[in-house]
Image (cartoon, grey):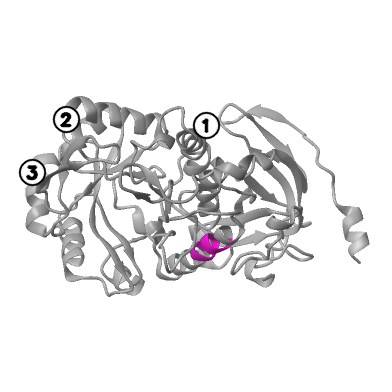
């Protein structure tokens, strides 16, 4: 049986080439349509909101040049971000000036972290900054873990909603998702790097990254399921650098460029409607324009903001296919929690080793149960910390769709052409890199097998 199926697979044929068309900006999920920002947010949370106009302008331009479109900041940065073309999620802990040395020993003045915002504070802040086009929302709480949603963020969200501000009320990292949903806090954010509870790619980042990939994807799978169940938009938060001790001394291994790419693109495979880099500090060596982390973020952010993000807005992930990695042995591990297995009767019949593919459907199709695939986010799942990354080379791999798929458009990176292929496609990618595929089903085809029918 398998032999006859394999014999029927169409080999990869490029049947047309064209310059990638300008993507039509899809509408956000229903739970996000009341907010004024309609783009896919690529967010830098930097904790670097220091005073000093010249320094702030330089910093904002540096973040924008890395192709971020949103930054978590305070009033000190509003004008600099506006001039640079960045949007601002206002970090709304009350501002009390605090002077200390940054990681390189330079004195900076920034807001001390005190109490979170209240409706009265929001009203006062909007009177000051509400006309600034950079402002798109407020961070109204963070780090609540598994505690219930506090009353403060609930009151702030209610006030923002009743006053029709169009501004995001963002409660960062709280596992009381049912409480969030009831309170109209429609953004689910999970920190994918907690030191003790989540391995992810955070903190020490030592050794080869297979266990980190699996832990990270397990967290993303939790977020995918929860966001779908409670009608929330998923914004996962991941680390861009490892933790530091004192004056720039970094704990553990610098993130490889493959790890940066993988964290962003795999989040989208799991249904992310925005991504949040926890940058810690842009003064670190790896964040200088010639640094490896900066270059990796600049590259993948451009792919997301120009090609992937505008298309995947308003879509839900119904599952992620994963194949077991090939040699070397240090990469040969089981697929992550909740991974789907390619096979006969599945949307994806076969993939080479070390590949991930997230199935994305329009929200309307998800709610109706049709689950008709619209896009598939395909990623080369090989990653390594910087010191090992030279062992991983660009490679070509194959992926075969089931017979219900008529054609596939491979949406290239900015400046690359779009390729149209049949059921079997080949992709040549760097470690951790990915491409978005647009899927067309055959006329009269039965809908693709539900993604949860093939667990690994």
Q: Measuring from the top left, give residue 322's x and y in whole percent.
A: 67, 60
**Residues tagged 1 and 3 counted as in contact (Cβ below 8 A):** no
Q: Measuring from the top left, give residue 3's x and y in whole percent.
A: 93, 61
Q: Is residue 219 magenta?
A: yes
Q: Nearer the viewer, residue 297 or 182?
A: 297
Residue marked by disc 1: 22
Say whether residue 132 is visible: no
The mark nearer the N terminus, 2 or 1, is: 1
Residue marked by disc 3: 127
Q: Quadrant of the C terminus?
A: bottom right
Q: Nearer the viewer, residue 35 or 219?
A: 219
387 left or right of 6? left
The mark nearer the N terminus, 1 or 3, is: 1
Secondary structure beneath dot 1 equals loop
Q: Residue at x 43, y 46 (%)?
A: 241
Secondary structure beneath dot 2 equals loop
Residue marked by disc 2: 52
Magenta-highlighted residues: 214-220
């Amino acid at each position: 049986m398998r032999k006859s199926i394999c014999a029927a697979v169409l080999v990869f044929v490029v049947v047309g080439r064209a310059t990638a068309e300008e993507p039509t900006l899809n509408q956000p999920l229903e739970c996000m349509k009341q907010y004024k920002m309609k783009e896919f947010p690529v967010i830098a949370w930097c904790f670097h909101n220091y005073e000093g106009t010249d320094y702030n302008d330089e910093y904002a331009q540096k973040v924008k040049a890395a192709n971020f479109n949103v930054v978590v900041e305070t009033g000190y940065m509003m004008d600099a971000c506006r001039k640079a073309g960045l949007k601002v999620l206002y970090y709304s802990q009350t501002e009390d000036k605090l002077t200390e040395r940054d990681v390189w020993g330079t004195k900076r003045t920034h807001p001390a972290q005190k109490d979170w915002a209240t409706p009265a504070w929001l009203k006062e802040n909007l009177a000051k900054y509400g006309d600034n086009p950079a402002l798109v929302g407020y961070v109204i709480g963070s780090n609540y873990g598994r505690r219930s949603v506090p009353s403060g963020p609930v009151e702030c969200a209610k006030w923002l909603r009743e006053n029709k501000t169009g501004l995001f009320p963002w409660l960062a990292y709280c596992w009381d998702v049912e409480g969030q949903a009831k309170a109209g806090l429609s953004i689910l954010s999970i920190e994918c790097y907690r030191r003790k509870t989540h391995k992810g790619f955070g903190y020490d980042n030592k050794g080869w990254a297979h266990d980190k990939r699996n832990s990270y994807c397990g967290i993303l799978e939790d977020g995918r399921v929860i966001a779908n169940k409670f009608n929330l938009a998923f914004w996962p938060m991941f680390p861009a650098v490892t933790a530091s001790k004192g004056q720039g001394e970094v704990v553990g291994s610098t993130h490889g460029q493959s790890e940066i790419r993988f964290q962003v693109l795999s989040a989208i495979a799991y249904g992310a409607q925005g991504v949040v880099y926890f940058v810690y500090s842009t003064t670190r060596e790896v964040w200088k324009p010639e640094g490896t982390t900066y270059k990796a973020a600049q590259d993948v952010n451009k792919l997301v903001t120009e090609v992937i993000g505008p298309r995947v807005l308003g879509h839900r992930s119904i599952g992620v296919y994963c194949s077991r990695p090939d040699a070397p042995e240090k990469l040969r591990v089981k697929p992550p929690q909740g991974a789907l297995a390619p096979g006969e009767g599945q949307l994806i019949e076969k993939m080479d080793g070390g590949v991930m593919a997230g199935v994305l459907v329009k929200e309307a199709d998800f709610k109706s149960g049709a689950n008709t695939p619209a896009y598939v986010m395909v990623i080369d799942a090989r990653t390594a910390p910087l010191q090992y990354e030279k062992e991983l080379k660009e490679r070509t791999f194959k992926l075969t769709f089931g017979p219900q798929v008529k054609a596939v458009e491979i949406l290239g990176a900015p400046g690359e052409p779009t390729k149209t292929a049949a059921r079997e496609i080949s992709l040549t990618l760097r470690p951790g890199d990915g491409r978005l595929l647009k899927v067309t089903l055959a006329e009269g085809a039965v809908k693709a097998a539900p993604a949860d029918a093939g667990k690994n």
